Each structure stands twice: as C-alpha cells, then as structure tokens.
Amino acid sequence: MTPTLYRAAFMHTPFNAFQNEGALHVQQDGGLLVNGGTILASGEFSALRAAHPTARVTELRGGVLLPGFIDTHVHYPQVRIIGGLGRPLLDWLEHVTLPEEARLSDSAYARAVAQDFLHGLRCNGTTTALVFGSHFKGAMDIFFEEAAQTGLRTVAGQVVSDRLLRPELHTTPELAYAEGKALIERWHGVGRARYAVTPRFSLSASEGILEACAALMTEFPDVHFTSHINENVAEVQTVRELFPGHLDYLDTYERAGLLGRRGVLAHSVHTTDRELGQMAAHRCSAAHCPCSNSALGSGLFPLRRHLNAGVHVALGTDVGGGTGFSMLKEGLQAYFMQQLQGRDGLPLTPAHLLYLSTRAGAEALDLHDQIGDFSAGKAFDAVWLRPPAGSTLAAILNHAGSPSETLAALFANGTQADVAQVWVGGEEVYARPADPLRDESGKQSPVLAS
Ligand SMILES: O=c1[nH]c(=O)c2nc[nH]c2[nH]1
Ligand SMILES: [Zn+2]
C-alpha cells in the first residue's frame, strides 16, 4: 500500500506535561507518514518528503492538526438531556436523567440515541471515549453495533445498580454478572471496542452487585473499570450511611477488589488524603469533569492535591451533566476552575490542556502505546481544526505570535464548527459538511425545516 504523507502544522504532547516542561512538541510545517493507519514517521515535512518521494501527499495546511481527543467520562444515554441546568446531582438524576435513561429499554429509541451520541463525539474531534453505558443489555449491544459503524474507539460497559434509582433500572448481582459476561465475550477486543465494568456509583450498589462486578474483573482481567466517586457532598454523606463499616467512598470499591491500573473514577471532587493515597497505590485515574462540576454545582476539583499524591488525572465531558462533547471547552473550563482556586489551584498552560485532552486520556485507559500522540508507531487518530474564514478564531490564529498562543486560542475559542476532519486509525470518521445548514447526509437543520 502506498503510504500517505499528511502535511500540516501539528502539535502533540508525547510526554506527561505535568512532569516534563518540554512536553509540547510542535511542527509548523510538519509531516506524518502513515501506512495502514499507523504513523511510520513524524517530523518536518521537507525531510520526510525527501526520504519518501513516492508517498501520496495530503495537504492539511491552513489549520492545526492535533491528536484525536480522548474523553474519559461521557454518558451515552444522556445526549438528549444536555443542558438540564439548575439542579444538584441527586435532584438532577431523579428528575432529568433517570427518566430519560429508562427510555432506552426501547431498542429503536436506544439506537437513535446511540447515533446522536456517537455523532456528537466524532464531530467534536473525539476519537476515543470511555463511555458510561445504559442499564439495558439490549441498548449496549446496539451501542457497540453503532460504534463499530462509526469507526470510533470506545471503552464502554453496561451500567449496573440494584437500589435507590427506579425499579426499571435495577438489576440483581446474578443478572449483572450474566449480562456483563455475555457483553464482554461478544464485544471486548472486537474491532475498536473494549469493555468497562461499570457500577453506576456506590449509592445505587449493594455489596452484592460490587462483588458481581469484581467477579467479572477476575474472570476477564484485561477489561477496564469505571464508576463515579466523591462528586457531591449529599452523595458522599449518603454513601457513608449506606456503608457504615467502610472507611470512606473509595473503600467501597477498594474492598470489593475493583481498583487497578485500568480503573477510572469520575469526579473525585471531595476526596480525602487517604483516598488519594490509595488511588495512587492502585494506579487508577481520576476523570476530571469541570463543566459538569460547574453545571451541577458539585465543587472545585483539587487538581494539585491529586497530582501531589501521585494520582493520574485525565478529562471527561460527563455529557449530560456536562454541557457538551467539546474537549476544547472542557479544557478551558478546567483552566478556569484552577484559576478560581487561587493558591490552591494549579495554573494550567496550553500544553497542560492539550495533554489532559489527549495523551492523559490514553494513559488513563492504558492505551498510550497505541494512541494519544503523533509518535511513530501510534495509530493515526487525529483532528484537523480549521476555523471557517471570517470567524473570530481565524482572525486570532492569523496573528498568533507563537504555537503556545495558537494552542491557547484554540482552547479559548474553538468549537465544533472548527472541526474540519477527523480520523481514527487512518480512516476518516468525520468531514465537516460544506453547507453548515445541512448534515453529512444532506438533511437540513430541523430548526429551519419546521
Ligand atoms: O455526573 C453524574 N452523572 C450521572 O449520571 C451519575 N450517576 C451517578 N453519579 C453520577 N454523576
Ligand atoms: Zn458521570
């Protein structure tokens, strides 16, 4: 197969930006030589062109190419309820979220929601996501089928709970184990899909259901684990009352044997020092979801405390508690929330924001040998940001004085409208329609059609 040489201004963070000042790598006139979906060489365009004169050149100048975004916490059944503002977590779950999640028992509804959800990811440049699934096994089979159609990388699992939600969302430890096993055997490692064992949160889980989750992880040791932790003070207090013999929230997962290198705990806002020490000891990650934490009024994420304790942190949009799929917006909100914490906050640079929204996610998912940056040997998962002519972002980028300024401007101003093209494993998974009032299939915007 003839390799393709992508010519672009590109930036990536092949190292941890919190540990390495030189983590941001920039090529103003860069080249990425790709064959069979894998990056063979990464560097200056002219040098790569000279070394590979027969490669087919794809011109991507006039924008910025970044590694595909990696969202480490996003809920598939919640795409249609984004924007339910004005309620704290438990109230929002009861009145906004759970009624919608119950609708996914209907297969046709679940398929339409899966399509909306996956479209939201890819048109925002997200190429890999750790997806909180549905409570219904049928809706998960549908999700994995639809994800395979789009070509996105997904790590996803059926959500399990057996108390305090609503009866139609409850399962039993036996059924949770049986359905989880069937889903893992059917989907884990098939194409670009992976499985994550997913108890919703300890508030809605008996010890029995956490044990069923642990049994799956013992039987299938390379699957992932994800759940929520320490998001909201009322939630934390309820978990304390429900598990009186446990040390704290983390202990409910820890004693069940659920924590490990492939564990991702969402939120972690009200986490104690003991919990941070144990999260680091188990090498699990925190998914920081700043838009959700702001929208639900959950609190200010203590980033500095996590990093000082040695806990790895990545970013999640937490759709639909969060406000959309854009990892650019999520990075900006993460920056804002550190700014608001004064001396306790950690001032985030553009390199930090790029790292958090790409490579840090790959590390959280233990996939950093395959994705997360543009080093040779990685998959060509990429997002080409090219603001429309006449947009404010185009004006800013035309006058940016340095790559770091360019990156800051992308996080501060970039939106879905700036995403021109997206690839996963060298395959195009999204191209911006020429007419912004029509989607990729030519269908007109429903606001105008009605
Ligand atoms: O932000 C959140 N979204 C949810 O859907 C959820 N469920 C439990 N805890 C949660 N937190
Ligand atoms: Zn969540």
Image (spheres, rainbow, N blue to C red):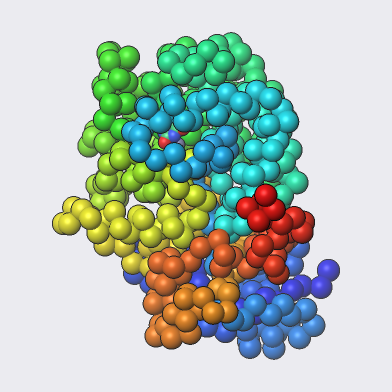
Q: Is residue 16 visible?
A: no
In the rendered image, the residue lying farthest to the left is: 343
Q: Nearer the viewer, residue 91 or 314?
A: 91
Percent coordinates x, y for residue 282 in the rendering:
38, 36
Where is the N terminus found, in terms of image quarters? bottom right
Q: Quadrant of residue 114?
A: top right
Q: Nearer the viewer, residue 112 or 267?
A: 112
Percent coordinates x, y for residue 262 in the rendering:
49, 39
Percent coordinates x, y for residue 201 in the rendering:
42, 26
Residue at the spot 70% in from the left edge and 35% down from the top edge = 111
Vertical arrangement, residue 51 with respect to residue 232, above or below? below
Q: Quadrant of residue 343?
A: bottom left
In the rendered image, the residue lying farthest to the front is: 450
Residue at the spot 43% in from the left edge and 50% down from the top edge = 315
Report whether 283 appears left or right of 363.
left
Vertical arrangement, residue 396 with respect to residue 136, above or below? below
Q: How many marks?
A: 0
Q: Quadrant of residue 332?
A: bottom left
Residue at the spot 69% in from the left edge and 88% down from the top edge = 50
Q: Quadrant of ligand 1?
A: top left
Residue at the spot 67% in from the left edge and 76% down from the top edge = 6
Percent coordinates x, y for residue 65 in the rendering:
57, 71
Q: Is residue 265 visible?
A: yes
Vertical arrangement, residue 264 with respect to residue 403, above or below? above
Q: Nearer the viewer, residue 176 or 188?
A: 176
